[in-house]
Amino acid sequence: MRVTLLEDDPNQAAILVGWLQEAGHEVAHYASGEELKPALADGRFDLLILDWELPDTTGIDMLEQIRSQVTWHVPILFVTARDSEADIVHALRSGADDYMVKQIAKAEFMARVAALSRRLGGEELDFEVGCYRFVPQSKTAYVNGEEADLTAKDFDLAWYLFRNVGALLSREQLMREVWNVSGLKTRTVDVHISRIRKRLNINPESGYRIKTIYQHGYRLEEV
């Protein structure tokens, strides 16, 4: 992928650039919002990684500017020291696709980058985690080797949750990414979450739980 990184800390930037280049990605690094602006106008990139605290602006301001001006949908990942739930919710509601709090581990960071890259298209491969196996071509899920009774949309939702373990996902984001709609006032997401909890036996005994975030959405957590 072509990755754009907005990070003013040179040491942090060097680490992230190194990890991304090691994985084969092209990386353009900018240290301020002003430096990034020409890239928004002149070039297309596949992933944007934003810090929150910047010398001339904030990551949130840049995020809102990007979502209002950039004509293609680029996945945006926040990597920041700000760790309050209010900040996380603010970023996600403003259009961020994922959020990580420093200090970050290489394996988790690269897994999040890979998950965002899959949204760009391409053939999905079978995916196994813990006692679960997901087969996207047939939209079939297995729990401990036994097929779960899921509808196609149940599968899509479960697939999205397990591809984004640990991420706080708003109902609006889930409607947009799983149902390809936005702006609907509906309990559709809640109904499907309840159903996949039961049909996939998502509970601490299975190693995972779906946490409900009040007035926002859900987070699939590894126990």
Image (cartoon, rainbow, N blue to C red):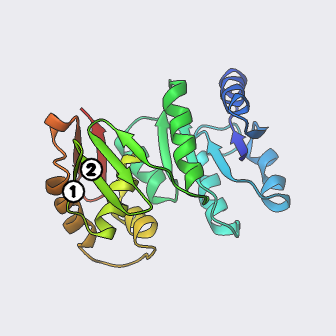
Image location (x, y in percent) of residue 193: 23, 60
Element type where label 1 sits in the image: loop
Look at 68% across and 35% down and name the residue there. 7
Asked if residue 80 can be seen in this view, the reply is no
Q: Quadrant of the C terminus?
A: top left
Does the rendering let one see residue 105? yes
95 versus 16 height, above or below: below
Amino acid on which disc 1 is placed: Ala
> Residue 189 occupies which quadrant of the picture?
bottom left
Q: Give the residue type that dot 2 points to.
A: Tyr
Side (left or right) of 37 relative to 139: right
Per the image, the residue denoted by label 2 is 142
Residue at left 73%, top 36%? Answer: 24
- Labelled pair 2, 1 in contact (Cβ < 8 Å): yes
Residue 184 in the figure: left or right of residue 80: left
Q: Indicate the secondary structure of the residue bearing disc 2.
A: strand
- For this rendering, which residue is in front, 139 or 162? 139
Decide which of tag 2 and tag 1 comes sooner along the chain.
2
Q: Which residue is mark 1?
A: 148
